[in-house]
Image: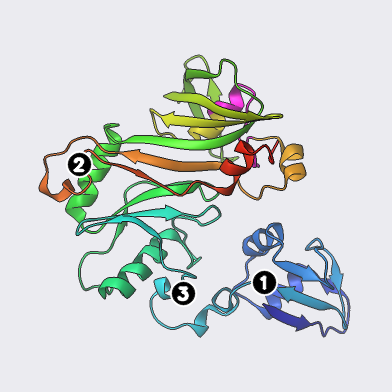
């Protein structure tokens, strides 16, 4: 935590004052920090448009490397907050559990999943940039989604895993909480997904549309609690925001989803991120020597806090 005592001859906006003090804090980062309650003005959360003046106190709950990135020397991965958390590892594959809120990759933010993976390999195996292949993401998760992400340690394994994902040979299963109980309790949803690049959203249609791609999502209800349902979801096709948009299209958006969800419910139940977890990956039987460690096996991520809360009826 950093405490700043404001010194300004005239009242100035909070965001302008902070960007002058810490040039690395872009407006995007400030908005994200405010959403996560990491900026306090005189002990309270205030809009970034609030005017500050001499005598005010600002508290920033941000790591030093975000405020002054030049303070840490060397490659960007050294500025990641933590090392990645492995679920499985062998000579060719690193399977990690991504926390909600962490981007898998980012142009300027050093604390990303791939950088945490590099930090893990650096600490545990002495990996260095330029000394051996760099680890590579084989697929991605949205920033707000938690769960399993496959990382390849060499280009040959990367291509093999990408091919398996493209050919839908790796079974991907998710856990999520929806605002609303799906009817029927289990089903296979089909439709067409169209991207709206300008808004950063996708739309789902039951009929073919120009630019639309076929999608298929299978779900079953595991438990219900009040207005909410805990679902296990199998991603048959893997499109952008597919599970989030597909469930929203049947009137059961994922709890905590600010793009496709019920924002009044999100605020009431105080979820920062969508209650969606890439919980299980199941591999087929494989013959390639590079993939023998995962052949025919299933791997699970740690179940998020909301899973048990719903089962106990505390989240409803």
Disc marking residue 61: 1
Distance from Cα at disc 2 to Cα at disc 1: 43 Å
Identify the element where label 3 is drawn.
helix
Task: Tell me if residue 283 is in the magenta stretch.
Answer: no
| First reached walking from the N terminus: tag 3 or tag 2 | 3
Q: Position of residue 235 (x, y in %)?
A: 41, 31
Count how many numbered circles sit on residues in the image.
Answer: 3
Say which of marks 1 and 3 sits in front. Answer: 1
- Quadrant hosting residue 247: top right
Q: Position of residue 32 (x, y in %)?
A: 65, 59
Overall secondary structure of the magenta section? loop
Distance from Cα at disc 1 to Cα at disc 3: 16 Å
Disc marking residue 295: 2
Say which of marks 3 and 2 sits in front. Answer: 2
Figure coloring: rainbow
Question: Which segment is the magenta one?
Answer: 246-260
């Amino acid at each position: 935590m950093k405490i700043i005592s404001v010194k300004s001859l005239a009242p100035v906006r909070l965001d302008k004052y902070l960007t002058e003090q810490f040039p690395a804090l872009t407006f995007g980062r400030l908005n994200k920090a405010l959403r996560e309650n990491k900026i306090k003005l005189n002990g309270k959360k205030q809009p970034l448009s609030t005017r500050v003046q001499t005598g005010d106190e600002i508290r920033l709950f941000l790591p030093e490397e975000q405020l002054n990135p030049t303070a840490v020397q060397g490659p960007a991965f050294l500025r990641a907050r933590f090392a990645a958390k492995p679920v499985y590892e062998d000579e060719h594959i690193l399977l990690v559990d991504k926390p909600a809120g962490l981007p898998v990759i980012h142009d300027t933010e050093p604390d990303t999943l791939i950088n945490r993976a590099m930090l893990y390999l650096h600490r545990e195996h002495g990996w260095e940039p330029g000394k051996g292949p760099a680890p590579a993401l084989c697929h991605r998760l949205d920033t707000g989604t938690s769960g399993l992400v496959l990382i390849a340690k060499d280009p040959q394994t990367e291509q093999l895993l990408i091919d398996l994902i493209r050919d839908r040979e790796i079974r991907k299963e998710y856990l999520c909480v929806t605002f609303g109980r799906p009817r029927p309790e289990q089903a296979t949803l089909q439709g067409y997904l169209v991207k709206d690049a300008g808004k950063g959203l996708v739309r789902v249609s039951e009929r073919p549309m120009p630019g639309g791609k076929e999608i298929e999502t299978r779900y079953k209800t595991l438990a219900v609690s009040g207005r909410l349902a805990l679902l296990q979801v199998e991603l048959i096709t893997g499109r952008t925001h597919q599970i989030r948009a597909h469930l929203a299209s049947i009137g059961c958006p994922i709890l905590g989803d600010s793009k496709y969800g019920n924002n009044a419910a999100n605020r009431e139940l105080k979820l920062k991120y969508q209650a969606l977890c890439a919980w299980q990956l199941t591999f087929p039987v494989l013959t390639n020597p590079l993939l023998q460690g995962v052949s025919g096996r299933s791997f699970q991520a740690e179940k998020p806090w909301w899973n048990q809360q719903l089962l106990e009826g505390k989240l409803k």
